[in-house]
Image (cartoon, grey):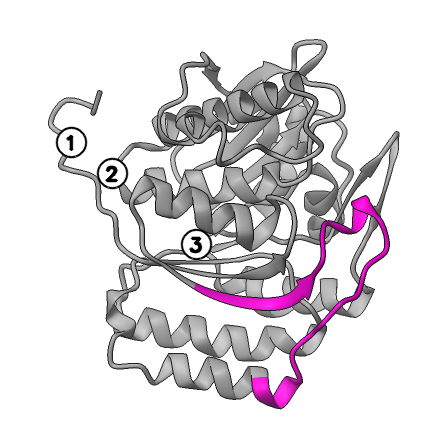
Amino acid sequence: MMQPGLAEPQRKPILVITSQVVRGGISGRGLTFALERIGHDVWFLPTILLPWHPGQGKGTRIVPALEDFKSLTADLAASPKLAEIGAVLSGYLGSQDQAGPIAKLIKAVKAANPDAPYLCDPVLGDLHGDAGSLYVPKATAQAVRDELVPLADIVTPNAFELGWLSGREVTNEMQALAAARTLGNERVLVTSSPALRRNAIANLLAAPRSAIAAEHAAIPNPPHGTGDLMAGLFLSNLLAGFDDEEALKRASASVFELVARSVKKGADELLFAEEQQSVVKAMALVTSRRVLETKVRA
């Protein structure tokens, strides 16, 4: 049910710039399916082609030649239909040199449609036990940090990526919120943020006028691709006119439900096609709460 007085959702095309896999539901493959299932047209610009998620085993990496990639982004930037795009979402980069052409394309979209938000999902690394590491070359991570994050209206790092981007320790909710505020973006959504409850996962949103956390039970050994999906659904919910808290709760519920259903069936990938109703309208309940900003800034 829509919020009272809320206009019909906007289903404008979204430009997605990220990796493409042949098998599995990570990055562009699952994200495009989810957004199209909701009702968005998708302009999809792959940054690299992989047979599957690297966590599934070694595979060939095909990165487009830089001059070809630059020409392709220039073609898109000059398109007379560019103003149709309602938002841009970037994720995994195939090389550090792609950041510059992507930045130019984002600026072109903004010039054609100033209302189009840009969401940067800085796919850089993750936690492993009590530590974390980059899984892209440091030069690529630096290019994302220096050329793409500053352009973004919304940034969606996980806890490790937030710590790397901010240069701060992120081991609890207050540290995560403080680190998110240092990035300077309008909205920072920290996925898999430290939760207050035991055996729980939180998505922490540092929004313009508030900080909100949505928590749900942790699911052991979840399939890859949850961060990509969370970013896409949160962006879609904002485009539909939901406020920050409702957009966060709905996206969190969909991701939680899809993960739970996929794990229950023993899948090693998110079952987008089989459990697509979870993307459209999740039945799972996710609690949300306001985080007191004064605790961070004291």
Q: Nearer the viewer, mark 3 or mark 1?
A: 1
Q: Earlier in the sequence, mark 3 or mark 1?
A: 1
Could you tell me residue 78's position as x and y percent? 34, 85
Left or right: residue 179 compared with residue 71: right
Identify the residue under disc 2. 241
Identify the residue under disc 3. 153
Asked if 272 appears above or below 67 in the picture, the reply is above
Asked which secondary structure carries label 2, the reply is loop
Q: Residue at x 28, y 65 (%)?
A: 114
What mark, if any, has residue 254 been given in the picture? none
Could you tell me residue 288's position as x and y percent? 46, 16
Q: Earlier in the sequence, mark 1 or mark 2?
A: 1
Identify the residue under disc 1. 6
Left or right: residue 95 compared with residue 238: right
The stretch in magenta equals 44-68
Could you tell me residue 160's position as x and y percent? 75, 41
